[in-house]
Image (tube, rainbow, N blue to C red):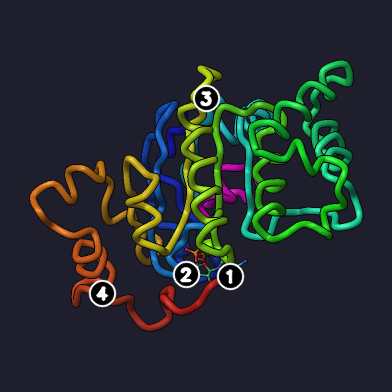
Amino acid sequence: MIEADGVSKRYGDLVAVDDVSFKAEAGEVVGFLGPNGAGKTTTMRILTGFLPATDGTARIDGHDIFEDPLAARRAVGYLPETPPLYPEMDVAGYLKYVAKLKDVPRARRGEAVDRALERCGLADVHRRVIGSLSKGFRQRVGLAQAIVHEPSVLILDEPTVGLDPIQIREIRQLIADLASPPDGAPRHTVVLSTHILPEVEAICRRVIMIHAGKKVLDEPIEELTGDGRRLEDVFTRLTLGVDDVPEAGAASPEVSA
Ligand SMILES: Nc1ncnc2c1ncn2[C@@H]1O[C@H](COP(=O)(O)OP(=O)(O)O)[C@@H](O)[C@H]1O
Ligand SMILES: [Mg+2]
């Protein structure tokens, strides 16, 4: 479970994240939807302990990210925009290395790696060098490194960016299975970011729209589109509405970190 409580991040005069609060339960896939520069990555980096917040805090499975950062970090798996893959390592060797970094006890590392390989559909390529894999398979390795220490919370930053339509479908299915595993394994809480509307409609149960650092919407997809409304219209109204145009010097929708 994730509970974010008034999280803010300032860079000088720029408020990149502005008082964002939300909750996400186990088994939920929550979509962070917003234009480039909205503050999605910054929020995710705060939740994963990579970046200190200016204000507010968050709890990951009840562990406060500032008061109990080690426990919080252990409970979270993170797929950054650019996963830290080592192209010259083989898949299994790399996952073993990540498991060690994440404090998985030596005796359990082999088993942890096998499980991550299995869940991410990587068993057949476990001896392949990462640099020789297709982008879709490298993204699977990125997901595998996020889950190898069996965190209950997964934070995925634009997990399908740059993939072809078949790879996108596979990765989306994989994410859905991580939230609600078909084999009855523990369910993850998943937060993923995207600027692609159909992505949210395809895999998320709830959408949190972020615009100019602020949470402007937090609703189940069903309710948003229930009475024939289109998510696209809601998105356009909230992100391009006259009342919502950022002031000069504020986050520009075109700028991405
Ligand atoms: N290290 C940084 N220093 C200054 N500004 C930053 C930094 N990182 C991000 N920003 C700014 O914060 C805002 C939010 O960025 P980001 O969280 O990357 O948005 P998103 O992931 O939604 O595209 C943008 O205006 C971006 O330029
Ligand atoms: Mg981003």
> Dot 1 corresponds to which residue?
257
Whole-Å distance between the Cαs marked 3 and 1? 28 Å
Check mark 1 vs ligand 1: CB closer than 8 Å? yes or no: yes
Q: Position of residue 176 (x, y in %)?
A: 46, 38
Contact between marks 2 and 1 (CB within 8 A): the answer is yes
> Who comes first in sequence, dot 4 or dot 3?
3
Name which quarter of the figure residue 115 lies in: top right
Contact between marks 4 and 3 (CB within 8 A): the answer is no
The C terminus: image quadrant: bottom right
> Dot 4 corresponds to which residue?
240
Whole-Å distance between the Cαs marked 1 and 4? 21 Å
In the rendered structure, the answer to whether residue 215 lies left or right of residue 49 reads left
Residue at horizontal 89 percent and vertical 39 percent from the top: 93
Residue at horizontal 54 percent and vertical 48 percent from the top: 170
Residue stretch rendered in magenta on the structure: 42-54
Contact between marks 3 and 2 (CB within 8 A): the answer is no
Contact between marks 3 and 1 (CB within 8 A): the answer is no
> Dot 2 corresponds to which residue?
37
